[in-house]
Image (cartoon, grey):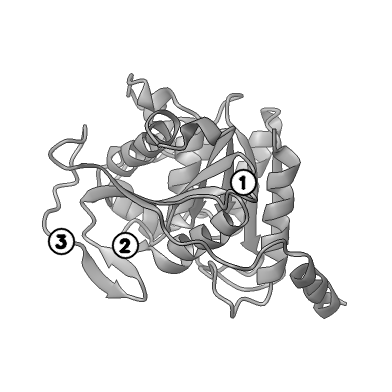
């Protein structure tokens, strides 16, 4: 039965071709951004399109196929435990596919926090501001969302609920909210028995207090102005416990914020856009249908 469903989903996917990258935009670096992560020098190649030592924030923009443009755009935050960035299977590969399906997609190479949480949060907020205010195709964008994977899911969720503003940032940038969020196997909670410890260690340091942790936990910061959100993950994720997603889902529902969650039977963590993931066709169909359902 499941195999038949996968075949049906594959047949129904609207586009399987890809789009080329159109623009590369430098947002800022440690000398021009509000906060610095203290890192310097070139990105370090970690293999498999992963980089560490990121200290310059950049956007790689893939513009929607004009013949299929939906009016939606999204900023992608790759994962990597806040230690590195998985720019390939959690970034560029998604962007190519999404642009071919009519969604303008900007992959954010954010600066790693290096124990300064404001750094990646400022980068994500600035990416949203750029897409709304400066991007050459801004007039065509009717809905702007944010999307993230694993620790990048924490960044996306934190940006969506306004963690920067909640932690004292009074800038107009910090007040921006996306119109929607899509989170893949996201790190959410800082609860010591439920969190992904490594992500919070690199974000806030190993000696953080629970009070500080709570200030950067999206499920505790979220308010009624949080955007509609879709979460997709695997039930057997042993790296980031599924309770991260279910806690965020429940928090949004209690606030009256529309939220959807798709928990796939297996697959573990970090599958991204990989063809080897058994349920790739299902998550693709789920995401495209959800985006269509919220389209204005």
Q: Are marks 1 and 3 in contact (CB under 8 Å)?
A: no
Q: CA distance from mark 2 to mark 3?
A: 13 Å
Q: Which residue is mark 3?
A: 42
Q: Identify the mark nearer the N-term, 2 or 3.
A: 3
Quarter placement of the N terminus: bottom right
Residue at 65% across, 50% down: 68
Question: Is residue 192 in view from this perspective?
Answer: no
Q: Which residue is mark 1?
A: 69
Query: Would you place residue 52 above or below residue 7 in this image?
Result: above
How far across and how far down the image is residue 219, in percent? Answer: 55, 38
Judged from the image, the secondary structure of the residue bearing numbered disc 2 is loop
- Asked whether, in this view, residue 12 is left or right of residue 63, the answer is right
Residue at 64% across, 43% down: 70
Judged from the image, the secondary structure of the residue bearing numbered disc 1 is loop
From this viewpoint, which residue is outermost toward the front? 67
Quarter placement of the C terminus: top right
How far across and how far down the image is residue 188, in percent? Answer: 51, 47
Look at discs 2 and 3 and give the one toward the viewer: 3
- Report the disc number at residue 152: none
Question: Is residue 228 in view from this perspective?
Answer: yes
Observer-nearest of 54 and 142: 142
Observer-nearest of 114 and 289: 289
Query: Would you place residue 234 above or below residue 109 in this image?
Result: below
Q: Which residue is mark 2?
A: 84
Q: Which of the 4 quarters of the picture holds residue 78?
A: bottom left
Q: Residues within 10 Å of mark 3 (few under 14, many from 20)?
A: few
Q: CA distance from mark 1 to mark 3?
A: 35 Å
Q: Which of the 4 quarters of the picture holds residue 175?
A: top left
Query: Would you place residue 226 above or below residue 277 in this image?
Result: above
How far across and how far down the image is residue 8, in percent? Answer: 82, 71
């Amino acid at each position: 039965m499941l195999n038949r469903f996968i075949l049906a989903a594959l047949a129904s996917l609207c586009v399987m071709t890809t789009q080329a990258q159109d623009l590369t935009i430098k947002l800022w670096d440690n000398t021009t951004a509000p906060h610095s992560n203290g890192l310097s020098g070139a990105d370090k190649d970690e293999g498999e399109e992963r980089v560490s030592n990121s200290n310059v924030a950049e956007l790689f923009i893939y513009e929607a196929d004009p013949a299929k443009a939906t009016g939606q755009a999204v900023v992608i935050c790759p994962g990597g435990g806040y230690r590195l960035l998985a720019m390939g299977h959690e970034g560029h590969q998604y962007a190519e596919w999404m642009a071919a399906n009519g969604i303008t997609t900007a992959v954010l190479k954010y600066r790693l926090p290096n124990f300064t949480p404001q750094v990646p949060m400022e980068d994500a907020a600035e990416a949203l501001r750029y897409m709304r205010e400066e991007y050459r195709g801004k007039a065509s964008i009717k809905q702007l969302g944010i999307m993230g994977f694993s620790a990048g899911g924490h960044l996306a969720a934190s940006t969506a609920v306004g963690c920067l503003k909640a932690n004292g940032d009074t800038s107009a940038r910090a007040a921006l909210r996306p119109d929607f969020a899509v989170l893949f196997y996201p790190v959410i909670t800082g609860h010591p028995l439920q969190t992904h410890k490594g992500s919070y260690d690199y974000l806030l340091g190993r000696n953080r207090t629970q009070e500080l942790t709570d200030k950067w936990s999206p499920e505790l910061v979220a308010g009624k102005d949080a955007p509609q959100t879709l979460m997709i993950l695997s039930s057997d994720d042993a790296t980031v416990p599924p309770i991260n997603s279910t806690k965020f889902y429940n928090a949004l529902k209690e606030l009256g914020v529309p939220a959807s969650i798709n928990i796939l039977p297996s697959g573990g963590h970090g599958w991204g856009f990989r063809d080897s993931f058994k349920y790739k066709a299902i998550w693709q169909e789920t995401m495209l249908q959800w985006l269509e359902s919220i389209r204005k």
